[in-house]
Structures are given as structure tokens and as C-alpha cells.
Image (spheres, rainbow, N blue to C red):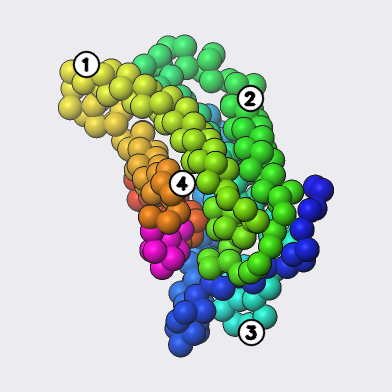
């Protein structure tokens, strides 16, 4: 990464506007982080130790839990440290690395959710050929493709760190968020921000369209099932995934498909918290409550 800037570090302001709440926020976010990590680890263990769960659906769920652990670990540990420390600086390279992995795990999860929708489409709409189509090789290719998309997007967006920085080095957020880092770049960044919004729309819409088409076919197939019990069973296999998709895409839409100036700093942090901190903790909760096999353990 070629540097063209005199900035050597950034100041992550975090929640410095409310210093009296730092200790309370630390306890809340530490609890969330512990529950997120332990909950997703338990999901992974529950899948690994039971041979009957070595199926495509649980293969993708295990990868989703792994991504959630990594995703929340990109931002939360540093945020917790800043809540207890007067020194809120992050080195230039550290900020770039944090942004890279935040984008990588986020985009990979988007694509993995689309892969999970495709898996449910095959299971419900093509049950007789499901095992042949969704074999181990196909599952690995889908997860590998999701990771490749995450890598390409993260590398593309990290180009902002090759731009010249000037003036303030303060980021009014709890992590190195791309649109706020852009505010520190010298000159007019309107077109760069527009490119990021258009790119985010493209990144979000492709997996979303695959999910939408998959669920149109799934719902159409479910409605053709004559017995109420059969319809309920078919819908229960994809309801957890549908809830996760709705939450994840709703928050991503608010976060990235609008100019950052349209939200106040506090609202921006609030939505970012829900998107990057609260959503990962919902994976073990939703899948445990909605999945009878996991709940029984």
C-alpha cells in the first residue's frame, strides 16, 4: 500500500461525547461480545459433534457462526479498550487493516446468506436431486466464492488509504469506517463517495436478488403442499435464515446506501452498533430458538 500522506495515526473518538457512560457501555458491550463468541462457538460445536448434522444447511450455518465471531472481533475489542483508555489512537496501518477485515467479513456474510438461500431453494424445490446437487464440492465452492467476493471488495475499497490525508486525523466513530475516513482526505471526495455508494448498492443487490428469487420459488412451492403440517415443516427450515437476511440487509441499507451526511454522528453510531455488534449475537439466538434440533441440545 503506497502511502501519500503525513498522517501516521488516527484518533477514534468513539463515545467520547458521553464520557460519564464509558463504564456502563464497557460492561454492556463486553457482555454482548462474550455472549456472541460463546453462543456462536456452541453452535459450531453442536454441529461438529453430531454426525447427522453434517449436511449442507448446517455446513453453511457453521460458517455463518464463524464469520460472526470474526466480524464482531474486528471492532469490539478495540472499542472496549478505548472505553477504558485515555489513549484512543490507532496507527495508520491498523486502521487500514481493521477496515479491510470489516469489509471482508461483512461482504462474505452477505454472499454466504445468498448461498444459504440457494441451499434452501434446492432442498424445498428439488428435494429428489438435493443430495446430488448440494454435495460437499458445491458447498465448498459457494463458501469459497463468498470469501473471494469479500476479498475483492475489501481490497478495492482500501484504496482510500493511498489518497493524501490532511488536516484533522479524528474519526467520530468507534472504528475506521470508510466514509468517515474519506472525510479526512484532502480535496473534494464527492465522486469517490458516490462510487462507494454505487458499489455498495451493486454488492448488496446481487446477493439480495438471488435470495429474493430463491424465496419466491420456495414460497410458491410451499403453497402447493397440501397438508398444513408439511407447509409448516418446509417453512420452518428457512424461517431463521429469512429473519437473519431481513435484519442484516435492512441495517446494511441504512448504513451504506445513503450519503453519510444524512445521519447525525450519534445516529450513525447507533445504526453501526446494531449492524456490526448486535446482529452477530442474533445468529445463535435465532437459530437456537427456531431450530428444534439445536434447541434440544
Label 4–label 3 contact, CB within 8 A: no
211 lies left or right of 181:
left
Q: Nearer the viewer, mark 1 or mark 3?
A: 3
Label 1–label 3 contact, CB within 8 A: no
Image mark for residue 256: 4
The magenta stretch is 263-272
**Crowd tier of the residue under label 3, counting other residues whose Cα lies within 10 Å: few below 14, some 14–19, many 20 or above:** few
SS type, badge 1? loop
- The numbered mark, 2 or 4, whose residue comes first in the sequence reads 2
Residue 39 location in percent, x, y?
50, 58
Frontmost residue, 104 versus 73: 104
**Crowd tier of the residue under label 2, counting other residues whose Cα lies within 10 Å: few below 14, some 14–19, many 20 or above:** few
Q: Is residue 109 visible?
A: no
Distance from disc 4 to disc 3, alpha carbons, whole Å, reads 30 Å
Q: Nearer the viewer, mark 4 or mark 1?
A: 4
Residue, x 54% and y 13% (percent of image)? 132
Residue, x 39% and y 64% (percent of image)? 264
Distance from disc 1 to disc 3, alpha carbons, whole Å, reads 62 Å
Residue identifier under label 3: 86
Image mark for residue 11: none
SS type, badge 3? loop
Label 4–label 1 contact, CB within 8 A: no
Distance from disc 3 to disc 2, alpha carbons, whole Å, reads 46 Å
Q: Nearer the viewer, mark 2 or mark 4?
A: 4
- The numbered mark, 4 or 3, whose residue comes first in the sequence reads 3
Image mark for residue 224: 1
296 lies left or right of 196:
left
Residue identifier under label 2: 141
Distance from disc 2 to disc 4, alpha carbons, whole Å, reads 28 Å
In this picture, is 244 found above or below 96? Answer: above
Furthest residue toward front: 187
SS type, badge 2? helix
Amino acid at each position: 500500500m503506497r502511502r501519500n500522506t503525513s498522517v501516521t495515526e488516527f484518533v477514534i473518538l468513539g463515545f467520547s461525547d458521553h464520557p460519564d457512560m464509558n463504564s456502563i457501555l464497557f460492561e454492556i458491550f463486553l457482555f454482548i461480545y462474550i455472549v456472541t463468541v460463546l453462543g456462536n462457538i456452541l453452535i459450531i460445536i453442536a454441529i461438529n459433534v453430531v454426525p447427522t448434522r453434517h449436511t449442507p444447511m448446517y455446513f453453511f450455518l457453521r460458517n455463518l457462526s464463524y464469520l460472526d465471531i470474526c466480524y464482531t472481533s474486528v471492532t469490539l475489542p478495540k472499542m472496549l479498550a478505548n472505553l477504558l483508555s485515555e489513549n484512543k489512537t490507532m496507527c495508520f496501518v491498523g486502521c487500514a487493516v481493521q477496515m479491510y477485515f470489516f469489509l471482508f467479513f461483512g461482504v462474505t456474510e452477505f454472499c454466504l446468506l445468498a448461498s444459504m438461500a440457494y441451499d434452501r431453494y434446492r432442498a424445498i424445490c428439488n428435494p429428489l436431486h438435493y443430495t446430488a446437487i448440494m454435495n460437499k464440492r458445491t458447498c465448498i465452492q459457494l463458501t469459497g466464492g463468498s470469501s473471494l467476493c469479500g476479498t475483492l471488495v475489501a481490497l478495492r475499497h482500501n484504496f482510500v488509504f493511498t489518497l493524501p490525508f490532511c488536516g484533522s486525523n479524528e474519526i467520530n466513530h468507534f472504528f475506521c469506517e470508510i466514509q468517515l475516513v474519506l472525510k479526512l482526505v484532502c480535496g473534494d471526495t464527492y465522486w469517490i463517495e458516490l462510487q462507494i455508494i454505487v458499489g455498495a448498492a451493486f454488492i448488496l443487490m446481487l446477493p439480495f436478488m438471488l435470495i429474493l428469487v430463491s424465496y419466491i420459488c420456495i414460497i410458491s412451492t410451499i403453497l402447493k403442499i397440501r397438508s398444513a403440517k408439511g407447509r409448516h415443516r418446509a417453512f420452518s427450515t428457512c424461517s431463521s435464515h429469512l429473519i437473519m437476511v431481513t435484519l442484516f440487509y435492512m441495517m446494511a441499507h441504512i448504513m451504506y446506501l445513503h450519503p453519510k451526511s444524512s445521519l447525525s454522528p450519534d445516529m450513525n453510531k447507533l445504526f453501526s452498533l446494531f449492524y456490526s455488534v448486535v446482529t452477530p449475537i442474533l445468529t445463535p439466538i435465532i437459530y437456537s430458538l427456531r431450530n428444534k434440533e439445536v434447541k434440544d441440545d
